[in-house]
Amino acid sequence: MPPRAPASEASHARLIKTADLIMSTVHARHAVEVHSDPKDFREALFALLRSRMAAPVGRRRSSELDRAEALRKQGKTYQQIAATLHPAYGSWGTYQRQQCRERIQKALQARKKRAAGLYPSTNRPDVSSASPD
C-alpha cells in the first residue's frame, strides 16, 4: 500500500524535509550498519519508528479499566474493585455482582495478555528485540 500524502502541499513539503533530515542523521551515525545489511537495518529502523509513534486511531483505553488496574496493583480484590467503580454495587443482585466482577477480571486479563504480546491488538511486528541505539 503506498503511503498517503498529507492533507496539504505545505505539510507534504515539511514531511519530506523531516524525512531527509532523519535519513541524513541515520546515514551519518550508522553508516556501517546501513552498508553491511541495508534490508535488516531498514526493517529494524521502521519497526522501531512504528513502535515510537502515537497509537493508531481506534478504540481508546477505558479509564474505568485503568482505575481497576491501579486498584488491582494495590492488592484489592475484584469485589473491592467492583464496589469502588460502581457505587450501586452493594444493592445489585448476586448474579449482577458476579457478572460485574467477571467482566472486570476478564478485561484486565485480556489487557495483560495484549501487553505481554500473547495475542496482538494490531498487526504490527514485534520490535522488542530492536535496539534503540
Image: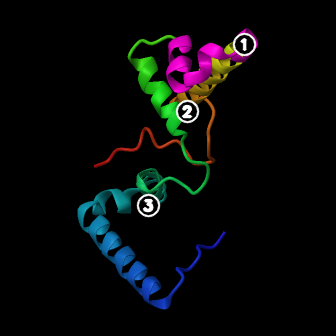
In this orientation, which residue lies closer to the viewer: 111 or 49? Answer: 111
Please tell me in which quadrant of the rendered image residue 104 appears. top right
Q: Which residue is mark 3?
A: 38
Above or below, 91 relative to 117: above
Residue 133 location, x and y as percent?
A: 28, 49
Secondary structure beneath dot 2 equals loop
- The Cα–Cα distance between marks 1 and 3, rounded to whole angstroms, is 63 Å
Residue hosting label 1: 93
Q: Nearer the viewer, residue 121 or 50?
A: 121
Residue at figure coordinates x 72%, y 17% from the top left = 96
Looking at the image, residue 30 lies above or below residue 85: below
Residue depicted at x 72% and y 12%: 93
Q: Where is mark 2, residue-wise?
A: 117
Tag of residue 21: none
The kind of residue on which mark 1 rests is Gly
Q: Which residues are magenta?
A: 78-96
Earlier along the polypeptide chain: callout 1 or callout 2?
A: 1
Q: Earlier in the sequence, mark 2 or mark 3?
A: 3
